[in-house]
Every structure is written in structure tokens, then in C-alpha cells.
Image (cartoon, grey):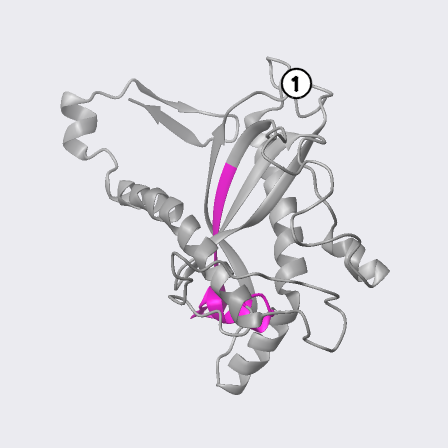
Amino acid sequence: MLEADYNLHKSNSTYFTDLDASRSHLLSNLCYGGVSVVEKELTAEGKTGIMAAIIGSVTTSFKKEIRIFQQYEVWSRILTWDKKWLYIVTHFVQKGSVKNKYLVTDILSEGHICGKCDGTGGEGNGASAARPVVYATSVSKYVFKKGRFTVAPERLLRASGLLGGNGKMGDVCSKNQSPQINIKDPLTKSNEGMDSPAIGQVVESERLKGLKYAKAWDELESLHAEPLGVNETSGCVPTIGHFNDISGYGFSYC
């Protein structure tokens, strides 16, 4: 109720609080081990400072309102990355409309995967499965720093064991190649059943798929160089007025 606006919907500003929590859970679960490894490597290389993930920007597209007392879920995943930025996409969806077969946290607690990883069986599979009800979609981008040194996302992801054996940027499957990945128990010491090169190729294919969205969003960066100039604010584009809030901060409207 405290998050409601005057329309009795979830206030737009409160989405960003949920984003903070969801992104933090995602990065800490996926990259905690890799951050520790990379930080030690960089320290050995003479780099100083604290290793940190710094938010660069966030954009949110609102598709459908969330009414008060309506239950929803926040799903985040890595969309793509380039030489500097890691992009995370987050969907706000109706509770229960996304069907998951198992969770990584369940695997870690139970010591094995319950069910299969081949896409067969389970609830919500097949072409007839209903699509999730999406309320909003957000894209966030992070840069990883140790002091003033920028850490490439690929280095961090590789140290976290997320790129497979040969998952390098630019290493993709051919159009006619569809690698079959048979993941067994991830906690066993044996690599039997895990085709690391194929995993790396699939990851790279997904990275390139998401990169087109990241590039389209990055086109907006040029707007930083387009504030209203002196001639515009006092000439052909007059300013309506300058107003202060209770703290004394000013706002101008054109």
C-alpha cells in the first residue's frame, strides 16, 4: 500500500527499488567467486583499490500497471556484455506466469538437479505454453572497477565459470550447428556429460543476440550532449518558470 500512487497502482519510482534487490541477488550468486579470483589477480598485477560493480544507467518501459495488493515477480538475467559494460534485463511479471523447472539454489541445497535439462517434460513447455504476463521491462548496465581500472565483463564471467571451456567473444556456432548440451550433476568432479566448448558457443550466441538491444539503447547516450543552450532557453524555446521544492532544489520547465 505504501508503494501506491494516486491511481492506486504501484508507483513508477518503486520499480527501481525492486531492481536494486533483483540485480544484487543475480550478480552476487553468479559472480561472487569470480570477483574474488579477479581481485586477487589484479592485486598481483599491481592494481589498487576496491573491486566494485557500478551501475551506469537504467531504463524501464512500462507496459501494464500493477494494482495494489496484486502479486508480481521480478526476473533478472544477463542480457549481454561488451568490452566495458555488462547488461542485465529485468522483467516484472504476474506471479506464477513464469514456469521454472528447477532453481540453482535448489541444486546447491539438494546436491543434484531434479528433473532433466533437455527441455522435455515439466510444466509450461511446448509451443502451447502461455506467455508470461509482463508488466514492465528494464535494462541496466554495470561496469566493474578496481580503483580506476576497468575490468572487462568477460574476464569476470570466465573467472566465475560461466563461459564454458572455450567461450571467447566472437566464438559462435555456425548456422547449421546446434550443439547438444547434456548437463548432469554440476557438483560432481567429473566433466562427463558436459561439453564445455559447446556451452561456450551457446553463451556467445546468446550474447550476440542480446547485443543488438544494447547497441540500440546506447544510441541514446548522445543525448547527454544535447541540453538546452543559452539561446534556446531565452530565445526560441522559452522557459515556463523556475520552481523550488521544500529542500530548495530548483526545477525548470520548458
At numbered mark 1, what does the secondary structure look like: helix, strand or loop?
loop
| Residue 183 % position (x, y) | 67, 63
Residue displayed at 65% across by 21% down: 4
Residue placed most toward the observer, 199 or 212: 199
| Residue 73 % position (x, y) | 68, 35
Q: Point out the image quarter for the N terminus.
A: top right
Mark yes or no: residue 114 visible. Answer: yes
Residue displayed at 31% across by 41% down: 220
Q: Is residue 116 above or below residue 93?
A: below
**Is residue 161 a member of the stretch shown in magenta?**
yes
**Is residue 223 a member of the stretch shown in magenta?**
no
Q: Point out the image quarter for the C terminus.
A: top left
Total numbered labels: 1
Res. 76 image quadrant? top right
Is residue 191 rendered to the left or right of residue 144? right
- Kind of residue at badge 1: Arg
Res. 133 image quadrant? top right
Q: Which residues are magenta?
A: 138-163
> Which residue position is annotated with label 1?
67
Residue displayed at 71% across by 30% down: 95
Residue placed most toward the observer, 218 or 95: 95
> Residue farthest to the top?
7
